[in-house]
C-alpha cells in the first residue's frame, strides 16, 4: 500500500491566504497534524470542528530547535507508515518557505517509500512585500534569525529576517547587524503582516529593535536596500568598483594595468601590512589590509578581462583548499596536537602537487617555496624542507663550525666574484644557525633595522636641537649620541 503525506501551508495568517486547494484538503477527513497551533488560521479548524493534533509539546520538551525538527519528522514518518489513509502535515505560510521540518521530511520520506505532495498557500513574504511596498525583483535576501549568518548580508539587497520571535533573538540579530550597518540605520519590525486587526509595524533604528515587547512568532525584521555609503561595506560593491575602474568609462591608469605592472605595488602593499602589524596600530592595519584586498580584486578583474578566471573562482579555490586541508574540522578526522595538524597539511599539499605534476618533471622536496620570497625567508624554508628528510647537522656546534669556516673563506676571498659567492655562503650559514636556534632570521634582521632607525633618528634629533648638520660633527660625536640613544626608551 502506498503511503502518502500531504504537506500543506496554512498561509501567512489571514484566512484569505489559505488557498481553495488547501481548504478542500482539510475537509477530506484525513488526520491533520500541525507543527504549531499558534497560527490565526487554526481558528478556522476550531470553527469547523476539524480534529487535529499539534507538535507544540515537542517544543517544550526538546533542548533545542534541531531536536524539535528531528522529533517531528520521525513521528510523522512513523505515523504515515502505519496509517491506512493519507496524512496531512500543516505548517504556517508556504510549506517551502523557511520550514526546516519540511526540508527534512522531503529528504527522508523517499527512503521510507512515502509519497510527498505539497499543497501551497500564500507565504508571509507576499504580505511582507505588500505591507512594505517593496519589489522582490530588486533583489532580496531571506535569513533565519535562529541561524543568523551576517556574512550573507548584502546592503545592495532588501533583507528580511524571520524567526525573531522574542527580545533575546532580536537582540542577537541587532548585535550582528550593527557589525555591518550603522546603528542608526532605519529598519522595520513587522508583526502579522497582512493579517487584519493583528498587523503592527514599527520603523525604528537598529539599536532599538530589541526594545519592542509586543513581538511573537509572526514577527519579521526588514532592512531596506542601503544607501551608496552603506553599500561600500559590501564585497560585491568593491568588485563592482574595480570593474568600473577598468571599464570603458573608467580610469585610464587602471585600464592599462597588468599582472606584471602591479607586481611592485603588490610587494609594497604587503610590506605596509607587515609594518602596520609591527606598529600595533589596528586602524592602520585595517586600512592596509584594504589596500592589499584591492590588489587581489584588481588581479582577479584583470584575469576576468582576459577570459582567465574571476574573483569568485579565486574564492572557490581557496575555500576548497581550506576544507581539503582541514579534514579534522570538516571531515571528522581526529588530531592530537598542532604538530599533527601541520604534518597532515604537508601530506595533503604533497598529494595535491602529485596530481598537478602527473606526467611532468620529477617532484622535488624543495618544491612549493614561492620564488618571490625575501631570500632570508626563502633560505630558511629551503633548509627546513631539506632537514625533514635528514639532510641536516646533528648538533648546533656543527653549525657554528660551518659558519666560522664560511667567514674565514669570505675573509680570504680576493675577487669580487669570490667575495660575492662567499658572502652568500656565510649568510646561508647564519640562516641555518637561526633555524637551529628557532629564531626567524627575517624578523631578527627586521628588529635590528628598526633599532638602527630609532638610534639614527635620535642622532638627527640631537643635531636639530643644537642647530647642527652632519657636516659640523665627527664620528666620535655621533658615536656618543648613538650610545645615548641606547638608553632612551623607544
Image: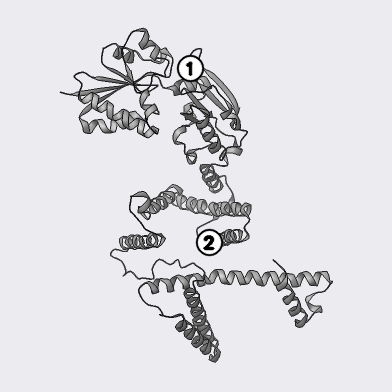
Is residue 383 in view from this perspective? yes
Q: From what the image shows, is residue 100 above or below residue 196? A: below
* Residue in view at x 61 percent, y 52 percent: 287
Q: Which residue is mark 1?
A: 194
Disc number for residue 419: none
Q: Residue at x 34, y 31 (%)?
A: 69
Of all residues, the one furthest to the top in this rendering is 48
Q: Position of residue 175 (x, y in %)?
A: 55, 37
Nearest the eye: 273 or 37: 37
Q: Which of these two is toward me, 460 or 239?
A: 460
Asked where in the image residue 349 lies, by quadrant, the reply is bottom left
Q: Is residue 459 left or right of residue 219?
A: right
Q: Regarding mark 1 in the picture, which secondary structure is present there?
A: loop
Horizontal side of 284 relative to 106 (left or right) equals right
Q: Residue at x 63, y 71 (%)?
A: 449
Q: Which mark is residue 263?
A: 2
Name the residue furthest left.
Answer: 1
Q: Position of residue 24 (x, y in %)?
A: 30, 12
Amino acid at each position: 500500500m502506498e503511503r502518502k503525506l500531504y504537506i500543506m501551508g496554512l498561509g501567512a495568517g489571514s484566512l484569505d491566504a489559505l488557498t481553495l486547494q488547501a481548504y478542500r484538503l482539510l475537509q477530506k477527513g484525513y488526520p491533520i497534524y500541525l507543527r504549531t497551533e499558534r497560527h490565526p488560521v487554526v481558528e478556522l479548524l476550531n470553527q469547523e470542528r476539524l480534529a487535529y493534533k499539534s507538535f507544540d509539546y515537542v517544543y517544550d520538551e526538546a533542548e533545542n530547535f534541531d531536536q524539535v525538527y528531528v522529533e517531528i519528522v520521525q513521528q510523522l514518518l512513523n505515523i504515515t507508515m502505519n496509517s491506512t489513509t493519507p496524512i496531512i502535515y500543516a505548517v504556517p505560510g508556504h510549506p517551502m518557505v523557511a520550514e526546516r521540518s519540511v526540508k527534512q521530511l522531503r529528504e527522508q520520506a523517499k527512503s521510507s517509500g512515502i509519497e510527498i505532495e505539497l499543497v501551497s498557500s500564500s507565504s508571509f513574504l507576499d504580505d511582507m512585500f505588500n505591507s512594505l511596498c517593496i519589489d522582490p525583483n530588486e533583489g532580496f535576501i531571506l535569513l533565519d534569525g535562529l541561524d543568523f549568518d551576517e556574512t550573507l548580508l548584502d546592503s545592495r539587497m532588501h533583507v528580511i529576517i524571520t524567526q525573531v520571535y522574542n527580545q533575546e533573538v532580536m537582540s542577537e540579530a541587532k548585535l550582528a547587524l550593527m557589525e555591518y550597518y550603522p546603528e542608526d540605520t532605519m529598519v522595520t519590525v513587522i508583526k502579522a503582516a497582512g493579517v487584519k486587526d493583528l498587523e503592527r509595524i514599527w520603523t525604528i533604528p537598529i539599536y532599538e529593535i530589541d526594545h519592542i515587547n509586543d513581538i511573537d512568532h509572526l514577527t519579521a525584521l526588514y532592512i531596506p536596500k542601503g544607501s551608496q555609503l552603506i553599500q561600500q561595506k559590501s564585497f560585491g560593491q568593491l568588485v563592482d568598483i574595480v570593474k568600473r575602474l577598468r571599464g570603458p568609462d573608467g580610469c585610464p591608469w587602471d585600464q592599462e594595468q597588468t599582472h606584471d605592472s602591479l607586481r611592485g605595488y603588490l610587494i609594497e602593499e604587503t610590506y605596509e601590512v607587515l609594518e602596520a602589524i609591527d606598529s600595533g596600530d589596528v586602524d592602520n592595519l585595517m586600512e592596509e589590509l584594504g589596500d592589499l584586498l584591492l590588489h587581489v580584486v584588481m588581479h582577479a578583474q584583470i584575469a576576468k578581462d582576459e577570459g582567465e578566471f574571476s574573483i569568485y573562482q579565486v574564492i572557490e579555490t581557496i575555500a576548497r583548499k581550506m576544507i581539503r586541508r582541514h579534514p579534522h574540522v570538516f571531515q571528522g578526522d581526529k588530531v592530537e596536537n598542532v604538530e599533527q595538524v601541520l604534518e597532515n597539511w604537508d601530506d595533503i599539499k604533497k598529494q595535491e602537487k602529485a596530481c598537478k605534476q602527473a606526467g611532468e618533471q620529477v617532484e622535488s622536496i624543495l618544491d612549493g617555496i614561492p620564488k618571490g620570497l625575501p631570500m632570508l625567508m626563502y633560505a630558511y624554508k629551503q633548509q627546513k624542507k631539506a632537514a625533514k628528510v635528514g639532510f641536516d647537522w646533528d648538533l648546533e656546534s656543527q653549525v657554528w663550525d660551518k659558519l666560522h669556516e664560511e667567514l674565514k673563506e669570505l675573509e680570504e676571498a680576493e675577487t669580487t666574484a669570490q667575495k660575492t659567492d662567499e658572502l652568500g655562503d656565510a649568510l646561508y650559514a647564519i640562516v641555518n644557525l637561526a633555524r637551529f636556534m628557532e629564531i626567524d632570521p627575517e624578523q631578527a634582521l627586521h628588529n635590528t633595522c628598526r633599532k638602527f632607525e630609532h638610534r639614527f633618528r635620535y642622532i638627527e634629533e640631537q643635531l636639530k636641537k643644537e642647530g647642527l648638520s652632519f657636516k659640523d660633527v665627527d664620528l666620535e660625536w655621533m658615536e656618543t649620541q648613538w650610545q645615548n640613544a641606547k638608553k632612551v626608551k623607544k
